[in-house]
Amino acid sequence: MPHYLRFIILLAAGWINRDQQKIIEYLLEEIRVCREHFNGRRLRFTDAQRRRLGVKAKALRRKTLEQFAGIVTPDTLLRWFRNLVAKKYDGSSKRGPGRPRTRDRIADLAVRMANENPSWGYTRIRDALFNLGIARGPKHGKTRS
């Protein structure tokens, strides 16, 4: 047998073996998930399980998934992977808890000023709080130092 023909056969066998290994890894992960959940009732997956199955499913092609995926449909597996990627890049890990709450004491004082001075509007109450040094300034939104 010529050397170039051996090389082509070995190359094709390597590609086939790689695809089979991906399928085996996916099926083993699927079996692990089934064993964790199978108690005669509907399977409910945790985020970690969805993540594991989604990553393994993405490594396979849709046609391969349609042949071998047994727990959930290929569309569901690929959707889990898309959601995983979308969640990774949505920026939620960089967001803070939001605007700090207004202190109750300041809010109570503003309400008391409004009740005691019915002719005062928002601007006058805001300026009065600024003059007391406990609220934002009347211009440019700066706080008093």
Image (cartoon, rainbow, N blue to C red):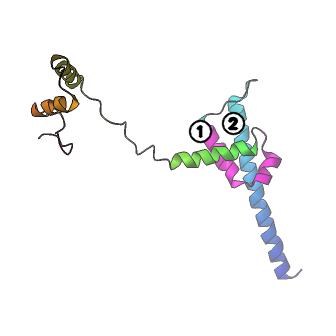
Residue 83 sits in which quadrant? top right
The one nearer the camera, 84 or 122, is 122
Residue 28's disc is none
Of 97 and 21, nearer the camera is 97
* Residue type indicated by callout 1: Ala
* Residue 9 occupies quadrant: bottom right
Specify the quadrant that holds the N terminus: bottom right
Residue drawn at x 17%, y 23% as measured from the top left: 119
Q: Position of residue 81 (x, y in %)?
A: 63, 47
Quarter of the image containing the C terminus?
top left
Q: Secondary structure at mark 2?
A: helix
Determine which residue is flagged by label 1: 48
Q: Of marks 1 and 2, which one's residue comes earlier in the chain? A: 2
Name the disc covering residue 33, or none.
2
Where residue 71 appears, as percent x and y from the top left, is 76, 38
The residue range painted magenta reads 48-72
Q: Nearer the viewer, mark 1 or mark 2?
A: 1
Crowding near the residue tagged with mark 2, few <14, some 14–19, many ≥20 C-alpha atoms within 10 Å: many
Residue at image point 72% right, 34% down = 34
Q: Nearer the viewer, residue 36 or 88?
A: 88
Q: Could you tell me the amino acid type at mark 2?
A: Val
**Residue 106 or residue 95, whichever sits in front:** 106
Q: Is residue 17 left or right of residue 56?
A: right
SS at mark 1?
helix
Do callouts 1 and 2 mark residues in contact (Cβ within 8 Å)?
no
Task: State left or right for residue 101 relative to residue 73.
Answer: left
- For the image shown, how many numbered marks are present on the structure? 2
The residue positioned 18% from the left and 18% from the top of the image is 112
Q: Is residue 127 magenta?
A: no
